[in-house]
Image (cartoon, rainbow, N blue to C red):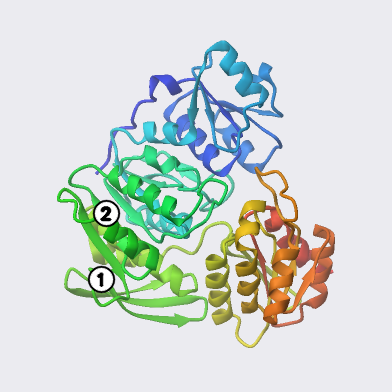
Amino acid sequence: MAAATPPVPPVLERPHLIGIGGAGMSGIARILAQRGAAVAGSDSRDSGTNEALRELGATVHIGHAGGNLDPGTTAIVVSSAIRDDNPELVEARARGIRVMHRATALAALMDAVRPLAVAGTHGKTTTTSMLAVSLRAMGLDPSFAIGGDLDGPGTNAHQGTGEIFLAEADESDRSFHSYAPEVAIVLNVELDHHANYAGLEEVYESFATFVGRIPPGGTLVISADQAGARELTERIGGRPALRLVTYGESPDADVRITDITPRGLTSEVRVIIDGRELAFTVSVPGRHYASNAVAALAAGVAMGLPAEELATALGSYTGVGRRLQFRGEAAGVRVIDSYAHHPTEMAADLEAVRAGAGTGRVLVVFQPHLYSRTRELGREMGDALLGADASVVLEIYPAREDPLPGVTSALITEAARAAGAEVRDAGSRDEAVDLAAGMARPGDLVLTMGAGDVTELGPRILDRLGA
């Protein structure tokens, strides 16, 4: 069903987004521009995403300065990564301009539509992307805001003509508490984002708050297999106004996976949904991606979409940027990029590419993300690297964090070596490229892995191999 484009909320008619080129911020900017808002913002460096926003009419400043704010600015939109001493934030407060978190802005954009939000410690971007691609293949043209690009720079968000709005719901800073989705997915619940959560108990409380935001009559789609998701299901109890749909391989799942058959870099999946068996193809490797596809199927059916048509459409999803994204092949060596940065994600992606690597070796170039995560999970990251034949480990990508005493990538490499993994240290990105290209031989698969700028090394490794 087509819907008229919702109006721009008055407070967002002339927004200024600090860090406009970021994954979450750029999506909000894109939707606002497509709705007709006079969008402006700033970023620390230029990018293809920023250029795509300029093509939509946005004003993008490179560098942060109080003078970047337009006199008519109605709101400043920030993420948790923006520090209090940012000159644009300081100027906005001095002028009395309203400051909004990006989640609040995104929640305002979901008014007057049918929101479907995807939450979980892992797999949010992939599952939301699966739904976006599938619904587009069905001709429904949903709106969406995703943490990764579907087709190219600037395509992480879209203002559609359909009535459904798909959103990735970020638990890292509890910002998903701003949403009130008609249907919500919880893929899994684990401890991560140690700078914001003191322990797993706080994580459960945060997810329970998110689930509590589902309006009466809404639906929660949640894993029946993952331990944290099952614990959350028990904790929220039987809310009479909440429809609960479980999915997975567990015998008691409402949407039950009966078989996942790997076929190279794809999988064939069989499920029983509403008493009927369906079979469909998932065009990316790994059991975890097959499970994500079933979560997407269950949520789509909960929104009223036909199961058979949606299952077929799910086969049209071939990946999203940085989620086991094929970057190319040179000298008989394939290079794939992975966003995995948590031990669970690392192990799952390594298992997936191992299944598609044939007789070749799997070589990893891993960049740890955040000092706090490395301090808490460094040993587990090292253990996860056992899934590779050999690894190169870079120094920690700090993102928004300051260094912590004694926390370096040595926490990972020492744990990996103690577990029996072959690991080499790289003191620089150049050294990592040299090591990876020097190690690789025809038939091997190189996996660049991490949430930082390690993604930029894949093309450089290919160039070196092809030289």
Could one spot residue 202 in this view of the protein?
yes
Where on the picture, by quarter, is residue 342?
bottom right
Relative depth, front residue between 314 and 274: 274
Compare marks 1 and 2 and give the one earlier in the sequence.
2
Q: Which mark is residue 131?
A: none
Q: Where is residue 408 in the image (x, y as percent from the top left)?
A: 74, 58
Q: Tell whether 203 sits left or right of 439.
A: left
| Neighbourhood count class around disc 1 (C-alpha, 10 Å): few under 14, some 14–19, many 20 upward | some
Can residue 466 be seen in the rendering of this structure? no
Q: Mark 1 points at which residue?
A: 253
| Quadrant in which the C terminus is drawn | bottom right
Which amino acid type is shown beneath numbered disc 2?
A: Ile
**Residue shown at 66%/46% (left/top)?**
399
Q: Which amino acid does label 1 sit on?
A: Ala
As displayed, is residue 48 above or below residue 244?
above
Horizontal side of 73 relative to 301 (left or right) equals right
Q: How many marks?
A: 2
Q: Position of residue 3 (x, y in %)?
A: 28, 37
Residue at point 34% right, 55% down?
185
Question: Of discs 1 and 2, which sits in the foreground?
Answer: 2
Question: What is the x, y in percent for residue 47?
Answer: 67, 41
Q: How far apart are marks 1 and 2 (CA)?
A: 17 Å
In the rendered image, the vertical position of residue 311 relative to residue 167, given as above or below: below
Quadrant showing the N terminus: top left
Residue 236 is labelled as 2
388 horizontally vs 170: left or right:
right
Task: Choose between 271 and 86: the one closer to the eye.
Answer: 86
Instruction: Give coordinates of residue 247: x percent, y percent.
Output: 29, 67
